[in-house]
């Protein structure tokens, strides 16, 4: 499969080349002294990652991570290259479940490389939006990183809405005494643990990025945008923590209701047994009289 989804060289925020291979991308970038490459990959091979490492002087540890997948969100700086791991999420309505994707981003002085594992996030729309704002894209690779962070964090909103909907349904099912509800609570709890792992580290990562942006004198406008993303992520993270707590409480309520129901059933059985005994006694005494 072709792992190069889209590769382009930009100058002053405008696309000047659309190479189809990595080798051609490297060549076209060298021809553009003020240019920047934005390379989008989906599940690249080891040799593709090694050719990127050789061209852009990427740290072997970050290459190892990008090959592996299943990384926790993190932000690492190797020399003048940033390595960012993000967990994207999307809500699948039909299955009523959350699907998590993983994204690795390398950001250097004149390049940005994205390595995607999984379906989310949709980066083609991010690139389109940036190409429509050359003023923003001309600020360089950090601007593209901001746009990707923004898209990943924006993608959490429909997930939060979907989960809220599930929570409301689960509450109704608990009080209706639905026998399937325990399984639903456990499944959603497991997804919320995963969602916490995606959002919690991002709060610290964005603050570290903002500190770096300030230190390296990144454009004021970009710093402001990044603050918005950081606020958004903090809010999302708090919502997810709230869901997890609420699910723990719902599980307790459900267990209490189930045991009350079982006690009532045991009492009803005991009473039925007592009545049956009385009937048998009556029948026995009649039998004694008659026979």
Image (cartoon, rainbow, N blue to C red):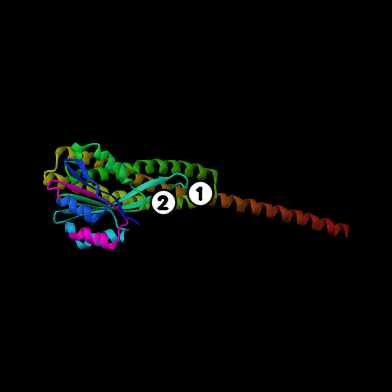
Towards the viewer: 263 or 80: 80
Question: Residue 243, percent across and down?
Answer: 38, 45
- The residue positioned 46% from the left and 50% from the top of the image is 185
Q: Can see residue 234?
A: no
Where is 227 relative to 102, above or below? above
- The residue positioned 76% from the left and 53% from the top of the image is 279
Q: Can see residue 253?
A: yes
Q: Earlier in the sequence, mark 1 or mark 2?
A: 1
State the CA–CA distance, disc 1 to disc 2.
12 Å
Question: Residue 203, percent across and down?
Answer: 25, 47
Residue beneath disc 2: 189
- The residue positioned 17% from the left and 56% from the top of the image is 56
Name the secondary structure under disc 2: helix
Indicate which disc residue 205 carries. Answer: none
User: Does residue 285 appear to the left or right of 158 in the view shown?
Assistant: right
Q: What stretch is highlighted in magenta?
A: 31-54
Question: Residue 174, percent across and down?
Answer: 51, 45
User: Does residue 255 appear to the left or right of 32 in the view shown?
Assistant: right
How busy is the neighbourhood of tag 2: few (under 14 within 10 Å), some, or many (20 plus)?
some
Q: Is residue 104 magenta?
A: no
Towards the viewer: 290 or 188: 188
Indicate which disc residue 181 carries. Answer: 1
Q: Quadrant of residue 232?
A: top left
How busy is the neighbourhood of tag 1: few (under 14 within 10 Å), some, or many (20 plus)?
many
Q: How many labels does the image show?
A: 2
Quarter the N terminus occupies: bottom left
Q: Does the magenta stretch include residue 32?
A: yes
Question: Residue 79, percent across and down?
Answer: 14, 56
Name the secondary structure under disc 1: helix
Towards the viewer: 249 or 209: 209
């Amino acid at each position: 499969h072709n792992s190069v989804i889209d590769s382009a060289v930009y100058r002053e925020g405008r696309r000047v080349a659309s190479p189809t291979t990595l080798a051609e991308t490297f060549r076209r970038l060298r021809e553009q002294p003020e240019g920047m490459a934005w390379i989008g990959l989906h599940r690249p091979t080891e040799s593709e990652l090694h050719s990127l490492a050789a061209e852009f002087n990427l740290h072997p540890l970050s290459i190892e991570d990008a090959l592996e997948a299943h990384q926790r969100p993190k932000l690492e700086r190797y020399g003048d290259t940033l390595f960012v791991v993000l967990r994207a999420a999307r809500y699948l309505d039909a299955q009523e479940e959350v699907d998590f994707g993983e994204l690795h981003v390398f950001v250097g002085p004149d390049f940005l490389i994205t390595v995607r594992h999984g379906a989310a996030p949709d980066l083609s729309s991010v690139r389109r939006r940036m190409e429509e704002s050359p003023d923003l894209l001309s600020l360089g690779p950090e601007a593209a990183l901001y746009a990707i962070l923004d898209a990943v964090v924006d993608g959490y909103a429909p997930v939060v809405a979907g989960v809220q909907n599930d929570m409301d349904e689960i509450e109704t099912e608990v009080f209706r005494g639905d026998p399937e509800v325990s399984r639903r609570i456990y499944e959603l709890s497991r997804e919320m643990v995963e969602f916490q792992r995606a959002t919690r580290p991002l709060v610290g990562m964005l603050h570290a990025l903002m500190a770096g942006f300030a230190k390296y004198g990144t454009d004021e406008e970009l710093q402001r945008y990044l603050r918005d993303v950081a606020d958004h992520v903090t809010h999302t993270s708090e919502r997810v923590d709230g869901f997890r707590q609420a699910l723990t409480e719902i599980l307790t309520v459900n267990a209490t209701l189930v045991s009350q129901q079982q006690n009532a059933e045991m009492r009803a059985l005991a009473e039925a047994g007592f009545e049956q005994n009385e009937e048998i006694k009556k029948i026995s005494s009649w039998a004694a009289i008659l026979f």
